Amino acid sequence: MDSERLLRQFEQAGFVIVPEEEPLDMARPDIVALNTCGFIQSAKTESIEAIFTVLEAKKRGLVKKVFVFGCLSQRYRKELPEEIEGVDGFFGADDAAAMLSAAGIAYDPSVSLERHLTTPSHYAFLKISEGCDRSCAYCAIPSIRGRHVSVPMDDLVSEAQMLADKGVKELLLIAQDTTFYGLDIYHKRMLGKLLERLADIKGIEWLRIHYSYPSDFPEDVLEIMAGCDKVCKYLDIPLQHSSSKVLSMMRRGIDGDTTRALVDKFRKAVPGIVLRTTMIVGHPGEGAKEFRDLLDFVREYRFERLGAFTYSEEENTYGALNYKDSVSQRVKQERYDTLMELQSGISLEYNESRVGTVERVLVDGFSDGTVHARSEKESVDVDGEILIPAAAIPAAMQGNFMKVKITAADEYDLTAQFI
């Protein structure tokens, strides 16, 4: 969304926006603006590799200027200019005006809520807040993004209305912590009220919640999810672990028993809910006993979607300053492989249980004789897809809802046929 707002400013100033997938030797852009991530080591590595790829294109005369912004340059404002030559400007996560100035244009407040969508026109992300007040031991986000700041509800409703007017049917609500929404402005959690107001917008058919925090989860959200057809019965909630010892060392504000009770509450309050979660393996404090606890937890609660990370010690976090990264990389990888093998079987069983059912799907696109679609049980990018063999797809079908019958499944994707 930061990129989309920036692109809209460039567009307002008369620039032509080149799709990211267009090769640089074909596009030959005046400016490449790279939005970088500085959260964990793998993301930092990917961002740096992208910078060097574009700089190589600049050396070949394919690009005139290279701007780098986002979390990586926010976190390493001093180090990056000293270590990487050829970049025309490093900017922080909130330096859009400065970057535009470096490009010779002025920030235009009249389009501050508008975006140049980089997603297909039928879905969009809606960032409801920025920053985080949590103090998780492993996480650098609060030091990068600062304290939690909610976007005023009226602004979000206005933005969502503009998106709906452009044909957006699905909104994916995101933040560093969506459950914290409203506390700073309205002095109480307001995610539920926001969902109700967004659901009233004509044209919006799906509202999907990402990046929820388990501690003090707002229960009214579950009531709204169970009772409102527009709110997907889908919740992305990174639980990170099940061991009370590890959760305490992670500073998550919740223990293992409360985590289990919370998942039980989700299942009871919203029958059929799809839970997406992530786990961290190899965190300080995780021994063989704690890892077995995690496996037992996953085996018992059978999350429909689960991803995992190996612990990455990040400088200046509480964990880096107070704990020893005592689990070897080999053991971390072994635990990751074991956990994901377990989850693969759970995912396969869940997907196979859907064979023969009829589901409402949103058609995302078509390629190589296959229609790509999702039900309310699949989110964008992070989950599998529903694949429908087809010789062709009518242009009017993309971005619209259809009924399909699930015919086959693997651990990731499902196959279906149109009804």
Image (cartoon, grey):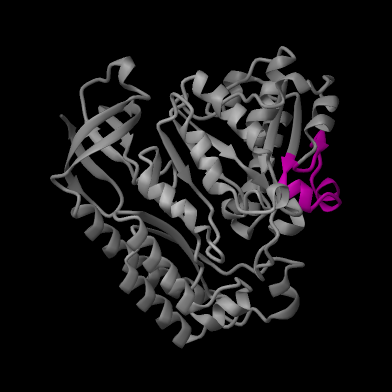
Task: Locate the C terminus by quadrant.
Answer: top left
Picture coordinates of residue 179 (x, y %)?
Answer: 57, 54
Residue 383 visible (yes or no): no
In the image, residue 141 above or below residue 81: below
Picture coordinates of residue 44 (x, y %)?
Answer: 65, 53
User: Image point 72% across, 58% down: which residue?
Assistant: 142
Picture coordinates of residue 347 (x, y %)?
Answer: 29, 58
In the image, residue 185 above or below residue 103: below
Closer to us: 171 or 32: 171
Residue 108 visible (yes or no): yes
User: Image point 62% across, 79% down: which residue?
Assistant: 249
Q: Is 408 colored magenta in this rendering?
A: no
Task: Locate the N terminus by quadrant.
Answer: top right
Q: Is 88 colored magenta in this rendering?
A: yes
Q: Is residue 406 left or right of residue 149?
A: left
- Indicate the quadrant where residue 19 lies: top right
User: Image point 35% across, 39% down: which residue?
Assistant: 229
Picture coordinates of residue 98 (x, y %)?
Answer: 84, 32
In the image, residue 305 above or below residue 259: above
Count of residue discs = 0
| Residue segment shown in magenta | 69-93
Q: Is residue 219 left or right of residue 39?
A: left
- Indicate the quadrant where residue 232 lies: top left
User: Image point 65% across, 68% down: which residue?
Assistant: 136
Closer to us: 29 or 256: 256
